């Protein structure tokens, strides 16, 4: 019984650790995409916040973020990220 409890606890810990690492990766990707939007002149630094919408992919991640300005209408940006660098950014229609 104790062995079964330990196995269950270890599995739960592994799943939680995996989810945390994944969340950290997506947070990093949101930041990369937002910085690329600033560099492209789509938004002004410090004048907006970025919100994760969706993401996926294998070696090349595709991430959608919402760029929400302090004043005005929000816009959606889609970034392709490979090896920690944004290879493409575009505004969604």
Image (cartoon, grey):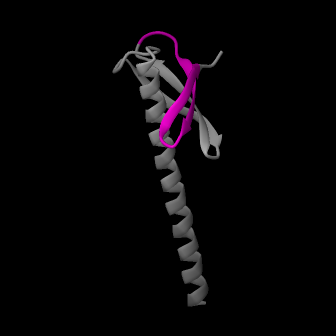
In this rendered view, identify the residue nearer to me: 24 or 32: 32
Residue furthest to the top: 72
* Residue appearing at x 38%, y 15% in the figure: 44
User: In the displayed structure, would residue 3 be above or below residue 79?
Assistant: below
Residue 90: give x, y in percent of width and height: 58, 20
**Residue 84 lies within the magenta run:** yes
Q: Which residues fall within the magenta stretch?
A: 71-90
Residue 21: give x, y in percent of width and height: 49, 55
Magenta segment, prevailing SS (helix, strand or loop)? strand
In this rendered view, identify the residue nearer to me: 36 or 64: 36
Q: Is residue 7 left or right of residue 72?
A: right
In this rendered view, identify the residue nearer to me: 80 or 10: 80
* Residue appearing at x 60%, y 40% in the figure: 61
If the image is split into quadrants, where does the N terminus sit? bottom right
User: In the displayed structure, would residue 19 be above or below residue 48?
Assistant: below
Where, by quadrant of the figure, is residue 19 drawn? bottom right
In this rendered view, identify the residue nearer to me: 74 or 91: 91
* Residue appearing at x 47%, y 20% in the figure: 68
Residue 2: give x, y in percent of width and height: 56, 89
Residue furthest to the left: 46
* Residue appearing at x 61%, y 85% in the figure: 4
User: In the displayed structure, would residue 68 be above or below residue 73?
Assistant: below
**Residue 93 lies within the magenta run:** no
């Amino acid at each position: 019984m104790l062995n079964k409890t330990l196995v269950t606890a270890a599995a739960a810990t592994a799943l939680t650790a995996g989810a945390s690492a994944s969340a950290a990766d997506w947070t990093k990707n949101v930041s990369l995409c937002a910085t690329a939007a600033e560099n492209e002149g789509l938004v002004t630094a410090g004048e907006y916040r970025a919100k994760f919408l969706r993401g996926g992919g294998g070696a090349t991640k595709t991430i959608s973020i919402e760029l929400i300005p302090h004043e005005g209408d929000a816009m959606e940006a889609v970034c392709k990220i490979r090896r920690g660098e944004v290879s493409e950014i575009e505004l969604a229609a």
